[in-house]
Amino acid sequence: MVFLAPKGGNTEQEWEDCAAGAPGSPANGDKPRYIVVDGATEAYDSVRWVGHLISSFVDAEAPELTRNSMRRWFVLMQELWKARAPARASYIEECKFAQGSFATLLGCELTGLAGPRPAWRATALGDTVIFHVRNGRLLTHFPELAANDFGLNPHGVHTSPAHLDNMVDKLDFTGGELVVGDLLFLATDAFAQWMLSFLQDDSHKLWDTLGRLDHPLSFERLVNDKRNAGAMKNDDVTLLRVHMVADEPAFLVMCLP
């Protein structure tokens, strides 16, 4: 399930994060995939850039989570960014297009769900974070950032080929085994930073609160409360939650605003 909240004072149309999932069919060997991307506010046309990254990562041509495959994918994304660019209306817009766009990325896939050893694997570039929780206890988070490690200049995926080598070099990978009941949370920087800060005070309450979220308005209230209390930066926030269950759900509940 995906929860989101734009910056205070902005509409959802101005939300510059993006998230998606492709559940697939483990019985047929498909690997469910999930991705969360955070577009840079100061970058040019970041909504279009994150849209390219999100849609490609979960489609049939998605990259394998290896360094070489991700490099080829970065090149393809940069080529598509340029080829599908709308016409620029002014010299200033042309200069901004030349400077390019930028986004942090966290991509995850699940494997072996039909077998005895299900697992997850993730790749990250920047300060979007995945948390692996079991029985109310954090097993790991990746990248391994502390609450005070979040800054204004994270690594990320850039539209310019000049950044390609550095992007591939900074790309990181990790993974872990899964059991029924496990939760994975993928969060963009402002929300991830708050999660890491709150962990120091009451980790059980944090995972209970996030595990029980069942409606977009509940998430919006949580974010607004933390912003008003000065505990969370006023930024676009996104949380994608994956819950490992033993069987397919018997029904689907849709939350309408």
Image (spheres, helix red, strand yellow):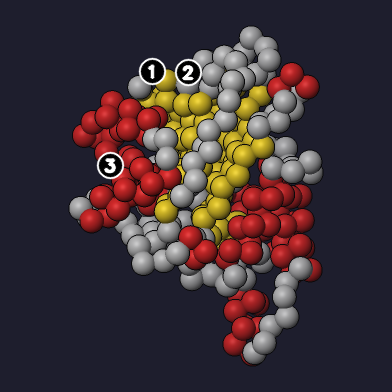
> CB atoms at circles 1 and 2 under 8 Å apart?
yes
Marks 1 and 3 sit apart, C-alpha to C-alpha, by 20 Å
Labels 2 and 3: the sequence-earlier one:
2
Q: Residues within 10 Å of mark 3 (few under 14, many from 20)?
A: some
- Circle 1 residue: 135
Q: How many marks?
A: 3
> In this orientation, which residue lies closer to the viewer: 136 or 125?
136
- Circle 2 residue: 181
Q: Tell me the residue at 59%/70% (across/down).
A: 45
Going by the numbered disc 1, the residue's amino acid type is Asn
Q: Splitting the image into 4 quarters, where does residue 163 fall? A: bottom right
Q: Which mark is residue 116?
A: none
Q: Tell me the residue at 39%/35% (across/down).
A: 213
- Relative to 38, does residue 60 appear above or below in the rendering? above
> In this orientation, which residue lies closer to the viewer: 148 or 254?
254
Going by the numbered disc 2, the residue's amino acid type is Gly
Give x and y (percent) for residue 17: 51, 55
Labels 1 and 3: the sequence-earlier one:
1
> CB atoms at circles 1 and 3 under 8 Å apart?
no
